[in-house]
């Protein structure tokens, strides 16, 4: 069964997305430092950022698996409602795609 979290999976993924974007900005700045200085310090910072990014990606994977587990639990508990929701989502998507 999925663990209870204080924030929704969508909020967690948005927060992770924001952190990854910030890391991208920092990485760009660091690469500029490497080009200018060619220093060992910048390479060390790059290694630390890569480790942090790997941690964020692992966290995103875990949050995704939690979200999948929550959906699976909901489908098991309420299969009729889940089927109806999936049908409604498909109908809405079909309507949006056919509007073009």
Image: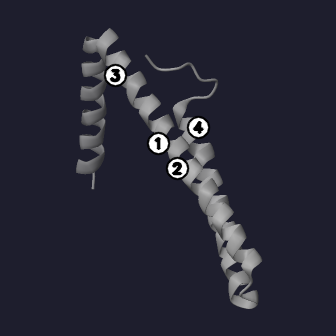
For marks 2 and 1, give the CA distance: 6 Å
**Residue ID for mark 1:** 61
In space, the residues marked 3 and 4 are separated at their CA atoms by: 19 Å
Is tag 4's residue or tag 1's residue first in the polypeptide sequence?
Answer: 4
Residue 61: x, y in percent? 46, 42
Dot 3 corresponds to which residue?
72
Which residue is labeled 2 in the image? 57
In the image, is residue 35 above or below residue 29?
below
Q: Is residue 35 above or below residue 7?
A: below
Residue at 59% x, 56% y is: 53
Q: Between disc 3 and disc 4, whose residue precedes?
A: 4
First in sequence, mark 2 or 4: give its number.
Answer: 4
Q: Quadrant of the C terminus?
A: bottom left
Q: How many angstroms separate mark 4 from mark 1 (CA)?
A: 11 Å
Q: Which mark is residue 12?
A: 4
Identify the residue shown where x is 55% and y is 54%.
Answer: 54
Say if mark 2 contacts mark 1, CB within 8 Å: yes
Farthest top residue? 77
Tell whether label 1 touches label 4 (CB within 8 Å).
no
Q: Secondary structure at mark 3?
A: helix
Q: Are marks 3 and 4 in contact (CB under 8 Å)?
A: no
Marks 1 and 3: in contact by CB < 8 Å?
no
Q: Nearer the viewer, mark 2 or mark 3?
A: 2
Helix, strand or loop status at disc 4: helix
Instruction: Name the quadrant containing residue 7.
Output: top right
Instruction: Give how far apart the Cα atoms at labels 2 and 3 are.
Output: 22 Å
Q: Nearer the viewer, residue 35 or 7?
A: 35
Secondary structure state at the residue bearing disc 2: helix
Spatial separation of the CA atoms under disc 3 and disc 1 = 16 Å
Foreground: disc 4 or disc 1 = 1
């Amino acid at each position: 069964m999925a663990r209870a979290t204080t924030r929704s999976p969508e909020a967690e993924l948005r927060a992770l997305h924001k952190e990854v974007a910030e890391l991208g900005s920092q990485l760009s700045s660091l690469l500029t430092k490497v080009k200018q200085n060619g220093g060992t310090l910048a390479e060390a910072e790059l290694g630390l950022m890569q480790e942090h990014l790997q941690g964020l990606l692992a966290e995103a994977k875990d949050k995704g698996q939690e979200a999948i587990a929550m959906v699976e639990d909901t489908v098991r508990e309420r299969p009729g409602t889940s089927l109806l929701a999936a049908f409604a989502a498909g109908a809405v998507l079909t309507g949006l795609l056919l509007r073009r």
